[in-house]
Image (cartoon, rainbow, N blue to C red):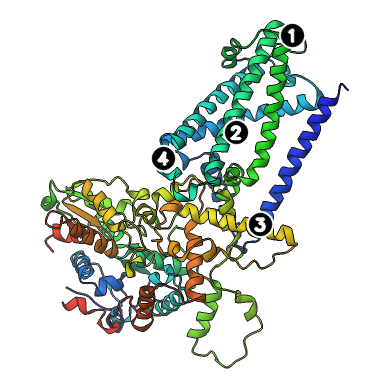
Amino acid sequence: MDYIDNILFAALLLVGIGFFVKNIQKIIRNIKLGKDIDRNDNPSERWKNMAMIALGQSKMVKRPVAGILHVIVYVGFIIINIEVIEIIIDGLFGTHRVLSVAGSIYDVLIGAFEILAFLVLISVIIFWTRRMILQIPRFWNKEMKGWPKNDALYILYFEMVLMSLFLIMNASDYSLQQLGAEHYIKAGNFPISHFIAAWLPQDIHTLVLLERGAWWLHIIGIFIFLNYLYYSKHLHILLAFPNTYFANLNPKGKFNNLEAVTNEVKMMLDPNADPFAAAPETANEDVPDKFGASDVTDLNWVQLMNAYTCTECGRCTSSCPANQTGKELSPRAIMMKTRDRLEEVGANIDKNGAFVEDGKQLLNDYISPEEIWACTSCNACVEECPVNIDPLSIIIDLRRYLVMEQSAAPQELNMMMTNIENNGAPWQYNQMDRLNWKDE
Amino acid sequence: MNVPTMAEMMAQGKQPEVLFWVGCAGSFDDRAKKITKAFVKILNKANVEFAVLGTEESCTGDPAKRAGNEFLFQMQAMTNIEVLNAYEVKKIVTACPHCFNTLKNEYPELGGTYQVVHHTELLKSLLDQGKITIEGGKFEGKRITFHDPCYLGRANDVYEAPRDLIKKLDAELVEMKRCKTNGLCCGAGGAQMFKEAEKGDKEIFIERTEEAIETQPNIIATGCPFCNTMITDGVKATEKENEIEVLDIAELIANAEDL
């Protein structure tokens, strides 16, 4: 019976990590439902972007208050998780503070963890205040009702609870060390929790219960949080890295030229082309089943990864000229809706083995034409995104479907395009008058 | 005003240093034509050997592409590329950031690779080479704010050339709250110029113009014919047209030189 704790812990570890791996595989499968796009060029610049933007948080600090608080939580998260290594070893082998063999280095580390945990706790409380008391507008747009709002709050509560448990665990450990309790070797440095220790009962039995309770709840909490990621906007802590690596490196104004269209236009403009000739053998491979995108599977995998990476901070929406002036469009909602539809398609595949037509698509059922026609393609959303998500590329692909497959552009745009076709200008002027300004 | 066409140049067996791509707005829009002429006057004064395509120029296809009509865009692009390549064009300057972006970024893959510069970049280099001098006297003490066109700024990272030119005018360059990478769109991009805005509670050009007015400028400078139209409308709508002028950088310089 002595080993029951260790066995329980091993089971928890296995289940916690097992579920996580299974869910990550599901996310990878869903992302791979996207069309292929080559983003393997220029690896040195890609690594640099990842190091600067994801690891270095360079775009986060453009809004300094949120940025610096985020850096604290992020650094705290990474560094405090070193402690998890010790927790896992202790849990599996029944040791206590096994890494304390490192001596004074260990003391410094534990001290640093404590200070960081405290700073994280403060930062998260400020985050909560910004969201709920100051009610910063970007957290209260209409797409932030219900689950997205709760999701954000759950994450903050999780972090508050985990940090508090960590500090309580250390505080009771510190008291036990002072009381010379068996098994609690003198190790660590407790700059924050020794203050908490002063409020704890000084009775070994209660303290052991408190220490063990906090220890278990803390590690269970970490495993729950790990598995919560899959359902949450918090996936960005993992996906920010590949997302910045595979992000677009071209100038933001450059939209891709559809290759399938190029082939057709070349045929049309080729004076030697025989309009009655049989289509060449390769033609079928080049022509996609549709131009543009009406559903998530028409988008490329980077766009789908973007959707999973979005943490709904709303910097894009708060800088979008259309959204600022009361239009339906919100770039954040474009990403959220893309993810919602992708998850729906994924669940459909899980249930049926392969995708079974469900009569829905991204366009119209999730994203309305009114939203996408409000975009000025100004790239403010792309510029703002702290992890290089590109909502504009999705908007343009949806427009392409509406225009090229459904001829469903707003009437005025159809007139503009007819003018370009007929007289080479978006307005009804004769091309022969193009140089008249010279003599006016 | 001396405005040779590529066809005339070719007939004389000459190749200009740079092709001036006028663009549809610059050719047909009454307000934008003034920008075109101001720019040409500067080119003439600096003795830059340039030419235009004249009636052989056609829309780059930018509004069609942003509206989602890739077919029409590529038709326009390939037709234009055929003309440009036939004249063996190497360098293009344009006063329209939309033409600039499309020619620079989207034509190469379709077979049209040129060195493309925005007119503010060319003016800046003429200044650096001493081919033009800017006497600021006329603008002394004036407050000028610069509205970043999205397709020049964020889309292509050109922020400094227009500002360097304004600073040469001895004017006070005042920045709006949202400028450079954070600049707010005028509302015309992405083919919005050619349609009514979607339902909302405000026009984007009003929002932007109000922000410009907050800097208490004498002049709102732009580098894009569409931004110019939008901001001009905004200034009219806020009844400030007697106090604030909306001018292109090329016009500022031409005015400074009394051209």
Badge 4 marks a residue whose secondary structure is: loop
Tag in front: 3 or 4:
4
Q: Which mark is residue A30?
A: 3
Taking the view exactly as shown, the residue that stands out farthest to the top is A179
Image location (x, y in percent) of residue A242: 60, 49
Say few, some or many: other residues with alpha carbon within 10 Å of mark 1 (under 14 / 14 to 19 / 20 or more): some
Q: Give the Cα separation between the discs numbered 4 and 2.
A: 21 Å
Residue at image coords 33%, 75%: A426
> Please, what is the three-letter code of the amino acid marked with disc 1?
Ala
Image location (x, y in percent) of residue B54: 28, 79
Q: Give the Cα separation between the discs numbered 1 and 3.
A: 52 Å
Q: Which mark is residue B82?
A: none
Instruction: State if disc 4 and disc 1 touch (CB < 8 Å).
Output: no
Instruction: State if disc 2 and disc 1 touch (CB < 8 Å).
Output: no
Q: What residue is disc 4 on?
A: A136
> Please, what is the three-letter code of the amino acid marked with disc 3?
Asn
Which chain is mark 4 on?
A: A
Which chain is mark 3 on?
A: A
Say few, some or many: other residues with alpha carbon within 10 Å of mark 4 (under 14 / 14 to 19 / 20 or more): few
Q: What residue is disc 1 on?
A: A181
Instruction: State if disc 2 and disc 4 touch (CB < 8 Å).
Output: no
Position of residue B25 relative to residue A127, above or below, is: below
Q: Answer with the quarter of the image where residue B2 lies.
A: bottom left
Residue at image coords 66%, 57%: A30
Residue at image coords 42%, 69%: B67
Which chain is mark 1 on?
A: A
Q: What residue is disc 2 on?
A: A158
> Please, what is the three-letter code of the amino acid marked with disc 4?
Ile
Taking the view exactly as shown, the residue that stands out farthest to the front is A146
The mark that comes first in sequence, 3 or 2, is 3
Badge 3 marks a residue whose secondary structure is: helix
Badge 1 marks a residue whose secondary structure is: loop
